[in-house]
Image (cartoon, helix red, strand yellow):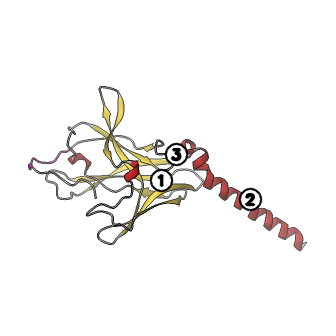
């Protein structure tokens, strides 16, 4: 009787181990399928960051909408204020009426993801993979993107999140949001990312 229950425990442990290996390998084997299980949505947060005329900032959240845990790439960082955080690689795309396509508008090149920058993340940052469990979410950094040069009221933007570093062409996108405010004229440049 004891050998039967020991065998059942060993079989269960083996099944759990095989499932873990398959889940860890799934993004490499089928990144587009894995991306289809992830959900991206944007959020506007009231309150400005000192840019006259702007009343909100934007960020996106990447969440796991499946029943399986998923490995995603994050930047594990420490800010210049000594706060720890995680962020996913992302950019912002703008709808181009002329071509009828979404085009890159703002963001960090994949090779520069998680690199330290002044008044932002420190040299203690590193890129790593983490498990994103069902229902769990990771956010992008927030941005006052509407302060960017080249935007007009009524333009439409969306976040494109790239959850797998090995596959930068695979993106999970948010629904679009309109540019509904622009900075008051001041004659100076603005820092839009934090």
Q: Are marks 3 and 1 in contact (CB under 8 Å)?
A: no
Callout 2 environment at 10 Å: few (<14), some (14 to 19), or many (20+)?
Answer: few
Q: Quadrant of residue 134?
A: bottom right
Label 3 sits on residue:
35
Magenta span includes 168: no
Of the image marks 2 and 1, the number of the one nearer the N terminus = 2
Q: Main secondary structure of the magenta part?
A: loop
Q: Position of residue 45 (x, y in %)?
A: 29, 55
Q: Position of residue 162 (x, y in %)?
A: 45, 48
Assign a secondary structure to mark 2.
Answer: helix
Callout 1 environment at 10 Å: few (<14), some (14 to 19), or many (20+)?
Answer: many
Q: Is residue 128 above or below residue 65?
A: below
Front of the two marks 2 and 1:
2
Q: Is residue 113 above or below residue 104?
A: below
Front of the two marks 3 and 1:
3
Residue 82 or residue 34, whichever sits in front: 82
Q: Position of residue 33 (x, y in %)?
A: 57, 43
Q: CA distance from mark 3 to mark 1?
A: 10 Å
The residue at the point 79 percent across, 62 percent down is 11
Q: Position of residue 97 (x, y in %)?
A: 30, 28
Residue 35 or residue 4, whichever sits in front: 35
Q: Quadrant of residue 83?
A: bottom left
Label 2 sits on residue:
15
Q: Is residue 97 above or below residue 189?
A: above
Of the image marks 3 and 2, the number of the one nearer the N terminus = 2
- Res. 52 mark: none
Label 1 sits on residue:
63
Q: Which residues are magenta?
A: 181-187
Q: Which of the image's four quarters has the N terminus?
A: bottom right
Q: CA distance from mark 2 to mark 1?
A: 26 Å
The residue at the point 40 percent across, 51 percent down is 111
Q: Which of the image's four quarters has the C terminus?
A: bottom left
């Amino acid at each position: 009787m004891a050998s039967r229950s020991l065998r059942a425990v060993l079989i269960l442990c083996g099944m759990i181990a095989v499932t873990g290996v398959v889940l860890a390998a799934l993004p490499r084997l089928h990144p587009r399928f894995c991306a289809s299980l992830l959900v991206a949505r944007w959020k506007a947060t009231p309150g400005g960051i000192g840019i006259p005329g702007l009343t909100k900032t934007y960020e996106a959240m990447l969440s796991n909408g499946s029943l399986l845990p998923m490995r995603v790439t994050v930047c594990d960082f420490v800010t210049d204020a000594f706060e720890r955080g995680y962020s996913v690689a992302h950019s912002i795309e703008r709808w181009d009426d002329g071509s009828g396509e979404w085009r890159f508008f703002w963001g960090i090149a994949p090779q520069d993801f998680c690199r330290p920058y002044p008044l932002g993340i420190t040299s203690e940052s590193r890129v790593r993979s983490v498990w994103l469990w069902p229902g769990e979410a990771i956010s992008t950094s927030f941005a006052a993107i509407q302060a960017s040069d080249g935007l007009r009221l009524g333009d439409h933007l969306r976040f494109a999140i790239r959850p797998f570093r090995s596959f930068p062409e695979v993106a999970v996108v948010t629904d679009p949001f309109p540019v509904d405010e622009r900075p008051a004229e001041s004659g100076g440049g603005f820092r839009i990312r934090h």
